[in-house]
Amino acid sequence: MEQSRLDLCVFLFLWFGLHFVHCDLSYSVKEEMKRGSVIGNIAMDLGFEVGTLSIRKARIKTVGRERTYCDVNLRSGELIVSERIDREEQCGEIASCVLNFELLLESPLELHHISLQIQDINDNAPSFPTDFIKLEISESAVKGARYRVNAAHDEDIGPNAVQSYSLKRNNHFVFNIQTTSAGSKYGELILDKELDREERKEIKILLTALDGGSPQRSGTLTIDVTVLDANDNAPVFSQAVYEASLPENSPLKSLIVTVSAMDADDGVNGEVTYGLGRISDKSRKLFSLDRQSGEIFVAGDIDFEDGTRYEMFVEARDSYGLSSDTKVIIRITDVNDNSPAISLISLTNPIPEDVSPGTEVGLINVQDRDFGRNQKVRCAIQQTVPFKLIPSIKNYYSLVTTEKLDRELVSEYNITISSTDEGSPPLSSVKVVHISIADVNDNPPVFEEQSYSSHVRENNKPGHSLCSVKAHDPDWRQNGTVIYSLLPGEVNGAPVSSYLSVNGDTGLVQSVRSFDYEQFRSFKVYVMARDNGSPPLRSNVTVSVFITDVNDNTPQILYPPPEGNSFMTELVPKAAQGGSLVSKVIAVDGDSGQNAWLSYQIIKSTDPGLFKIDLHSGEIRTQRDISDSDNMKQNIVVAVKDNGQPSLSATCSMFLLISDNLAEVPELKDMAYEDSSSKLTSYLIIALVSVSTFFLTFIIIILGLRFCRRRKPRLLFDGAVAIPSSYLPPNYADVDGTGTLRSTYNYDAYLTTGSRTSDFKFVTSYNDNTLPADQTLRKNPTDFEEVFGDLDVSPEVNR
Ligand SMILES: *[C@@H]1O[C@H](CO)[C@@H](O)[C@H](O)[C@H]1NC(C)=O
Ligand SMILES: *[C@@H]1O[C@H](CO)[C@@H](O)[C@H](O)[C@H]1NC(C)=O
Ligand SMILES: *[C@@H]1O[C@H](CO)[C@@H](O)[C@H](O)[C@H]1NC(C)=O
């Protein structure tokens, strides 16, 4: 019974990369099936896997109707009845009753036409226009006289329609069925045996109409015949069929058509009244008939979309009950009264911002319930948005992207789709489709600046804030959340994390330890900003840290050696003239710039007029010729001061012996200052002499070894102190001959006891580590930086 048939696969075409296969399916089903009854299996008939239907969002759409009547079961692929289908309601008397549907599948869009043939079942019984009619027949009527009786009607068709009539047995009448030239049927009651009013005044006849269905249904008509004296002519219509056309929406009481029937009789017998005969319930609500004039008026809302053609029968009846009928056909013409209806069939929302141009994001259907040109629609987007409509099958349009989308620029669109039909005047409608754009992690964090730098004074506290880095990421939520971190690396062989830390949330860069300008003056690290997307995007920036000097190193005197260690004495020849070089104080300062600019001053001396010291070179010279009256033992105290703010200083004592040979030297203890304890001094002298002796021997051995390997260097000057140029750092000259030596260099210093004949080489390796770090941390920060900031960038740092 649910015989199905895959009709024909009409055509296949490619359009904008979408494949539309258009196939027709045709099914047949009986009317009045229960809900859920299976009509056929669509999936099987189209050759799909059952799952395909739900994946491709298969659905049934009606064509030109509001109700669907059937549905597709996505799990089984079956087409099922979803609402009561009444063939008579859908098609009336039309023999072939077909409902059209569309099966819509997405991605790619595919449309199938389904036609559903509704089969009739015998669900209506025959019925007469009225249950009861009254006939008045003259007793003079002859045998064979015919009396018209309207035929019974059965809404079913074919074999289920009226097939036969049976008249209850009686003595006077037989029943016969006739067909008019218009094809409609009517009955005739034929007088078989003359009536005799005197014998029987009234006859009751029962007429039964039977259909051919199974089970058979029937309808009855009671005819009351009153026997009268005379007989009349039945009224006759001027036309067998009246046809009229009526625009929809015609106002109430508009005249549609006038029917008229003539009765040949005179007087009362010729008075014709009209009545609606067989008429559908729907027509009865829409049309009214003037009983006297035969005019048919509009009595309800005429809607072309509801029905395009109405048929009815009008009866004309004379006073004696003789009647005839005519068919009235009213055709409704379309008026452009429906604006196009835009419906959104499907929409991908939100759309990821990285969809490529030309991606289908939605499907739109436009329907106009009007007819012909009034139904033709055009659909467009009037705004400038990166979307367009591409017409696909019939009234379907694909909404596709035309450009790359960027959520960071436009995060949502309200797309106004307008549709206009071709009626006159045209009607149009709009629909706003809201589309939001979903984020994709497509933007890396971007630092506000290309690089960051920070100046920090040495000896800073750990945790000192150096600078703050900031990166922006315009993406959404976690895709735009920036996390900072240090890129692993090394500074001076130690991991960067032991120098700096960066706050992951705020980007604040802090020192982890205290920096020492004397160790390094600047370093560079990379800070990375990463977003929280998956996968994350990152970027990096350099952070340069410049350490500025603080005057934290006291000058360190290399020669003469610190008191207590040795007790050196310079010999000054008696014949020395004024201005001759006697000795030299050599000092270095670990700081740089002004902080290491050393100046020398004699702060105490046995004979203040005898010696002077050069402020910058530290060279000690006689101020005047030595005279015999001068004390043989001279003691001077030299202060070495750097130029920092505040400045740091160191002092040393120097013993000078005015003599031409050591043999003349008196007891050394006398040379000690009066303020030194004489006992201690004598111990010191003993210690000094022994240590010096040992030390000199040692030095001479070293020097001997060294001279074997290397040529004797050229001496800078012929004075008591000689510093060979090859042993000086290359930039020694930069420091204005102040004698300042850089902390990181090894250097050799030539020292002498002052005798021009007995030079010796004093070899040492100066190293920062020999200075206790906490020895001097005196600072006067602000003015220091202002004055000496420029000096920091000497090129000799960090080798
Ligand atoms: C879109 O329409 C909605 C609701 O009408 C409104 O809230 C929103 O601001 C509109 N967006 C744009 C981009 O116009
Ligand atoms: C972040 O981007 C990814 C793709 O890169 C996306 O799947 C995710 O939904 C985005 N997150 C948010 C909160 O938008
Ligand atoms: C830092 O970023 C640049 C590009 O911005 C990249 O070439 C370089 O490899 C990155 N450096 C590190 C250490 O990741």
Image (cartoon, rainbow, N blue to C red):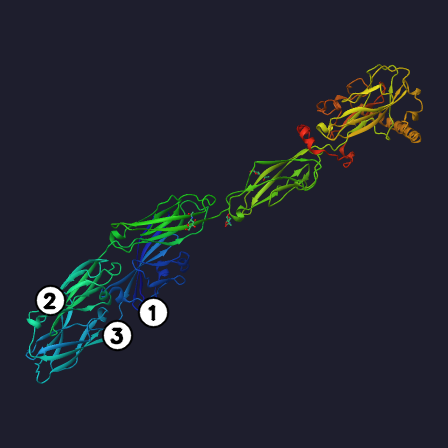
Amino acid identity at mark 1:
Lys
Give the CA separation, mark 1 to mark 3: 19 Å
Location of mark 3 (residue): 214
Task: Residue 35 in the image: state x and y as whole percent.
Answer: 35, 68
Amino acid identity at mark 2:
Ala
Viewer can see residue 455: yes
Determine which quarter of the picture holds residue 734: top right
In the foreground, 377 or 259: 259
The mark found on residue 261 in the picture is: 2
Residue 622 falls left or right of residue 667: left
Give the CA separation, mark 3 to mark 2: 40 Å
Amino acid identity at mark 3:
Ser
The mark found on residue 34 in the picture is: 1
Outermost residue on the bottom side: it is 199
Name the N-terminal-most of marks 1 and 3: 1
- Mark 2 secondary-structure assignment: strand
The mark found on residue 792 in the picture is: none
Crowding at mark 2 (Cα within 10 Å: few <14, some 14-19, many 20+):
many
Name the N-terminal-most of marks 3 and 2: 3
Name the N-terminal-most of marks 2 and 1: 1
